[in-house]
Image (cartoon, helix red, strand yellow):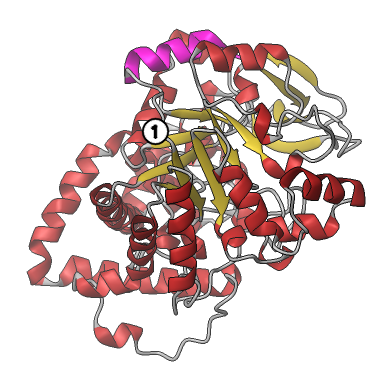
Amino acid sequence: MKAQRSSGILLHPTSFPGRYGIGDLGPQAYRFLDFLHETGTRLWQILPLGPTGYGDSPYQSFSAFAGNPYLISPDLLLEENLLHPDDLKEDLDFDADSVDFGRIIGWKLSLLERAFIRFAREPELATTREQYAAFCVDTATWLDDYALFMAIKEAHGGGSWAGWPPELRNREEAAIAEACEKFSEAIERFKFYQFIFFRQWNALRAYAKEKNIQVVGDIPIFVSFDSSDVWSNPELFYLDDKKVPTVVAGVPPDYFSPTGQLWGNPIYKWSVHKESGYAWWIERFQASFDIVDIVRLDHFRGFSGYWEIPADSLTAETGRWVPGPGADFFDAMKAALKELPIIAEDLGEITPDVFELRDQFNLPGMKILQFAFSDESNPFLPHHYPENCVAYTGTHDNDTARGWYAAAPEHNRDFARRYMSVDGNDISWDLIRTLWHSKANWVVAQMQDLLNLDSDARMNFPGRLGGNWDWRMREDALDDALKDKLRALNEATDR
């Protein structure tokens, strides 16, 4: 992948400001792209865009193909005559600093349902209905199963498909035909949400292209068990005759976790994927590149070898290493896609075969500056970076730069100060400047670090239940002072 020397900001759309309780794809998203353009910042990195479920994690989605309806902009719905001005007149008191998912989900879905009713009834929306019909045809390979899955899930109180009646769980032909008829209106409603999401997202991405900004998306290697992907393609995963996983994903015990991490995602039957020429994965990649320019491939090491855990295990200690699909997989992707604009997330306990697979396909790996300050030989120190890498102050799984420094052992703090020749009083921007001056082709900072925020603004605490993914930026954050500061740094470092 050819990479022009550039800089970027990591900011998920849920973190945009606005009055509706959660960031969306409306005016504030366009304002952010204007900010990137005016500062000469050419990369916007996001997290997965799929519909979120339990825990509100973008890495546990109901679909690897669908979009998150909570990101739909009410303001744009109003502009498109899909809402009446009265629908948005209520006095909203949502928190400006964080997303209260428990509150906003019900409110947002009620609003979207009103838009759907208007869409179905208003005579002047006939053209929009024609566009919707075309969208349904174009995306039928995943949309039909997804909308049916969500309609049945809704009818069963939102519970996992593992608890559905056996005939629905097993997708028996008669039961599926009956469900399609019984839930036809709900199916159309869920399809409508996808139509609106992609309509708004595609317009935003087109605006990014006009501004010479590339969008960096994210593909999690594993999918959630409670997803339309597993329900509609059970043959692609290790499930028993009751459609329950026999083995699940995770990572083994290490210095940070003596019991490892038990993620619980079902494991792919890679032999079945190979027999199909990796058709499902090719469709997944193609769908991703239809909406972003570059993807960060999460848990890249799993394509070389992954930690397989018996599904009845209580921790990840009892797993074993199993070979992944390796180069054969990426050969198939390259043959289908021609190019592989992929960032390999190669962090953690990595073995040489993972680096060999990454380098065989010339994929840039990741460097995290927060990890660097142990000793002079640390590979995350900038003077060790190759050009073909993407370097971060920290990712969504890390603390903010300021929070990291406050909690770091004094040895690491002292080494960081000496390495960067700073006193540590402006540590967020010390890290940003050091990163921007490195020879890494691409450098990315969390928006929280550009704003010099402490640990309260952290996006995710891995392993912690609840309280994640909810940080929001204040409306006055993108001021002229920050704009001038970032533009000057991009110019000085030829980014």
The answer to if 65 sits in the magenta stretch is: no
Determine the image quadrant of residue 402. Answer: bottom right
Give left or right: position of 148 versus 264. Answer: left
Pick the quarter of the image with the N terminus: top left
Q: Is residue 203 visible?
A: yes
Few, some or many C-alpha atoms within 10 Å of disc 1 (few <14, some 14-19, many ≥20)? few
Q: Which residue is drawn at 33% across and 20% down?
A: 337
The residue labelled by disc 1 is 4
- Residue stretch in magenta: 324-337
Residue 336: say if magenta: yes
Where's residue 356, x and y in %? Answer: 61, 11
Question: Magenta span: helix, strand or loop, mainly?
Answer: helix
Q: Position of residue 137 (x, y in %)?
A: 20, 40
Q: Residue at x 44, y 79 (%)?
A: 19
Drawn side of residue 92 relative to residue 299, left or right: left
- Of residues 454 and 115, which is closer to you in this image? 454
Q: In this view, does 119 lie to the left or right of 59?
A: left
Circle count? 1
Report the residue at 12% width, 66% height from top. 125
* Image quadrant where one finds the C terminus: top left
Looking at the rendered structure, the kind of residue marked 1 is Gln
Q: Nearer the viewer, residue 357 or 182?
A: 357
